[in-house]
């Protein structure tokens, strides 16, 4: 089935939680997550200051998603001069509700959930 024949879906990304994050500088990370679907920016969490194990309450919804689109989450350490990328998680999305664990390049883990539901 071609991607153009797949049904349009509602994508909801939620339950973002990181563990054992490392700061690029000495100290404790001030972490946030940016969420993307394919090439579209869905949003950004608030910064959780001085926390190696942050959780975020935000949910991100997108109406024009399709199965097999790429979901990308980028975890950053907020700094005064420039923010440092701690790691990127990418996954081809599937219909249903899923929980995933992603090991970040600089250390630490990002846990997240998403639901992809066909529109009626």
Image (tube, grey):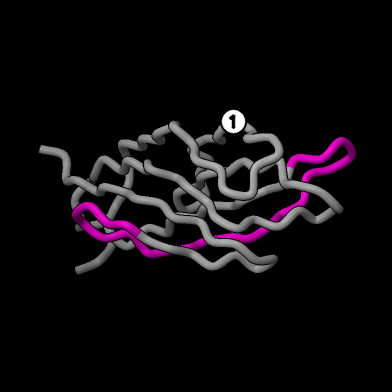
Outermost residue to the right: 81
Residue depicted at 56% across the width and 43% down the height: 54
Which one is in front, 38 or 31?
31
Residue at image mark 1:
46
Which one is in front, 55 or 37?
55
Which one is in front, 70 or 101?
101
Residue 16's place in the image compared with 102, above or below, is above
Q: Is residue 38 magenta?
A: no
Horizontally, residue 84 falls left or right of residue 97, namely: right
Horizontally, residue 105 falls left or right of residue 80, namely: left
Horizontally, residue 97 falls left or right of residue 32, namely: left
Residue depicted at 19% across the width and 54% down the height: 96
- The total of numbered circles placed on residues is 1
Q: Secondary structure at mark 1?
A: loop
Residue 13 appears at what percent x and percent y? 37, 43
Horizontally, residue 35 falls left or right of residue 116, namely: right
Residue 47 appears at what percent x and percent y? 64, 33
Part of the protein shown in magenta: 78-99
Q: Is residue 97 magenta?
A: yes
């Amino acid at each position: 089935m071609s991607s153009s024949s797949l049904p349009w879906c509602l994508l909801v990304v939620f339950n973002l939680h990181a563990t054992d994050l490392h700061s690029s500088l000495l100290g404790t990370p001030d972490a946030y997550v940016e969420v993307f679907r394919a090439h579209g920016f869905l949003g950004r969490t608030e910064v959780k200051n001085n926390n190696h194990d942050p959780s975020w309450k935000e949910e991100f919804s997108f109406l024009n998603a399709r199965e097999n689109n790429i979901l990308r989450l980028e975890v950053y350490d907020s700094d005064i001069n420039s923010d440092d990328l701690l790691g990127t998680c990418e996954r081809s999305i599937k219909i249903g509700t899923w929980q995933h664990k992603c090991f970040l390049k600089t250390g630490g883990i990002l846990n997240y959930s998403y639901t992809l539901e066909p529109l009626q």
